[in-house]
Image (cartoon, rainbow, N blue to C red):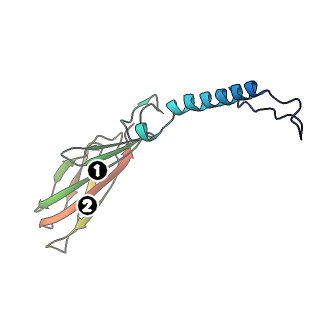
Amino acid sequence: MAKQTINLGTTPTGVGGDTPRSAFTKVNSNFDELYTADSANYKRSNFLAPVSQAGGVPTGGAMEKISNATGFVYKYANGMQVTTQEVIGYTALVGLRRNFPAAFFGVPAVTASVLPTSNWDFSCQIYPWDGGFEFMSTSTFPQNKVFVMAVGRWF
């Protein structure tokens, strides 16, 4: 339905305009349309909610935050997914394989940052795949933390 505008008539008296009853009927119709649309649109109660899709069209919330034993997952209605996780206290990370907190559709872009506490000479390379990543490093860091973030698509 299109917006219904009240006919105010001609100035200065309003001759030829809508009667009070027809004017308020239009007002009520306009509000009914707004309230009906509001129930289908995103708002506080359904913005942060389980994200889903059907045929590539979002059908759930706009954003979903999930936490599990592996880390955190941020899923968005447009298909983007971001995962974050922390790896603490490993020595000789040669070939250490870890899973992402959630599966990706394809291989995501992965980055890592180190918060060193004892060994400042730390470097590593990360090799991602769709289910996780592999550290390759000869450095040891028994107390250091490595923060890993992956960005890709969930559908």
State how far apart marks 1 and 2 are (Cα).
Answer: 10 Å
What's under tag 1, amino acid-wise? Pro
Where residue 133 sits in the image (x, y, percent)? 24, 50
Disc 2 residue crowd, few under 14, some 14–19, many 20+, Cα 10 Å: some
Front residue of 61/102: it is: 61
Disc marking residue 56: none
**Residue assigned mark 1:** 128
Is 34 rendered above or below residue 128? above
Instruction: Give me the residue at 18% from left, 57% from top.
Output: 87
**Mark 2 secondary-structure assignment:** strand
The reply, left or right, for residue 41 in relation to residue 152 is right
Number of callouts in the render? 2
Front residue of 79/36: it is: 36
Front residue of 59/113: it is: 59
In which quadrant of the rendered image does the N terminus lie? top right
Instruction: Give me the residue at 51% from left, 35% from top.
Output: 41
Where residue 80 sits in the image (x, y, percent)? 41, 44
Q: Can residue 135 be seen here?
A: yes
Disc marking residue 125: 2
Instruction: Give me the residue at 27% from left, 64% from top.
Output: 113
Q: Can residue 93 be seen here?
A: no
